[in-house]
Image: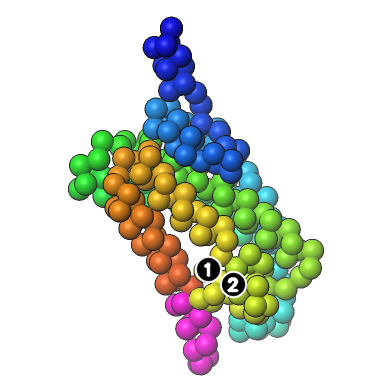
Amino acid sequence: MELQNEVKVQKEKPSLFGMFTNPVQQFERIKENPKIWVPLIIVSIIYAIGTIFMALSMEASTLIDQGVPEDQVDLILTFTKVSVAVTGILSPIFGVLISSAIQLAIAKIASSPVTFKQLFSMNTFIMIIGATGLVLNMVIRYTIGGNFEVYITSLAGLLNQDKAGFLGSIEVFGIWTLILTALGLHKTGQFSKGLAWTIAIIFFLIGIGFGLIGTLLQGAPKL
């Protein structure tokens, strides 16, 4: 009877909602029973909702500030809104695919027995945090106005800055994702705690690096 109960627990499906309440349990379930398609569809839909609100939050003045000629603003704004909405559906898939492939390569070097399916499932479940953050921030930004690139939950938003830049990369849901990535790589990926945290921090720092590059480019003189 005890053996049957143990098998039953191991085969329980991981829950997306459980990533908010008990992520460690979900990572253990993903290790034994990785799920991909339904969670990926749900996360993609949530991202799509977030990017739709992002598109609706875009204003012509933002493009003008970026150097777009005023006589072309309406056309480019419409094209940008459509592109952003479409990208919202595809970006989670490519994001999970790329991060899982990189992590699998590291796993091979570290002699971890984790499979690509486990990593793909793990990263899909983690992305529910980023998707929720996107929807929350874009709904707020759509309601109160302002630069949609500046998340309200970031340091840039807290300091009421007009541009995201470096401080925009230091954000609540981003840090939350960092922590879950480290936990997931340890529990599901079977990495050592040190390696798991190192990889998660490197991914986070790369994001901050892109934010810094964006800040430098925004401050560069226009030709």
Indicate the secondary structure of the residue bearing disc 1. Answer: loop
What residue is drawn where x is 39% and y is 56%?
Answer: 200
Q: What range of the chain is rendered magenta?
A: 212-223
Q: In this image, 77 relative to 21: left or right? A: right
Q: Is residue 192 visible?
A: yes
Q: On the image, which quarter does residue 62 sit in?
A: bottom right
At x 29%, y 47%, the residue is 192
Residue type at numbered disc 1 = Ile
Residue at left offset 52%, top offset 69%: 169
In this picture the colour scheme is: rainbow
- The residue where tag 2 is placed is 155
Residue 151: percent from left, percent from top: 63, 66
Inspect the image, locate mark 2, and give the three-letter code of the amino acid beneath it. Answer: Leu
Residue 185: percent from the left, percent from the top?
A: 37, 45
Q: What is the spatial separation of the Cα atoms under label 2 and label 1, in whole angstroms?
A: 6 Å
Position in image of residue 91 (x %, y %): 51, 52
Within 10 Å of the Cα at label 2, are there few (<14), some (14-19), or many (20+) other Cα atoms?
Answer: some
Where 57 sits versus 112, above or below? Answer: below
Q: From this view, report whether residue 65 is shown above or below residue 185.
A: below
The quadrant holding residue 149 is bottom right
Instruction: Specify the quadrant that holds the N terminus.
Output: top left
* Camera-side residue of 215 and 152: 152
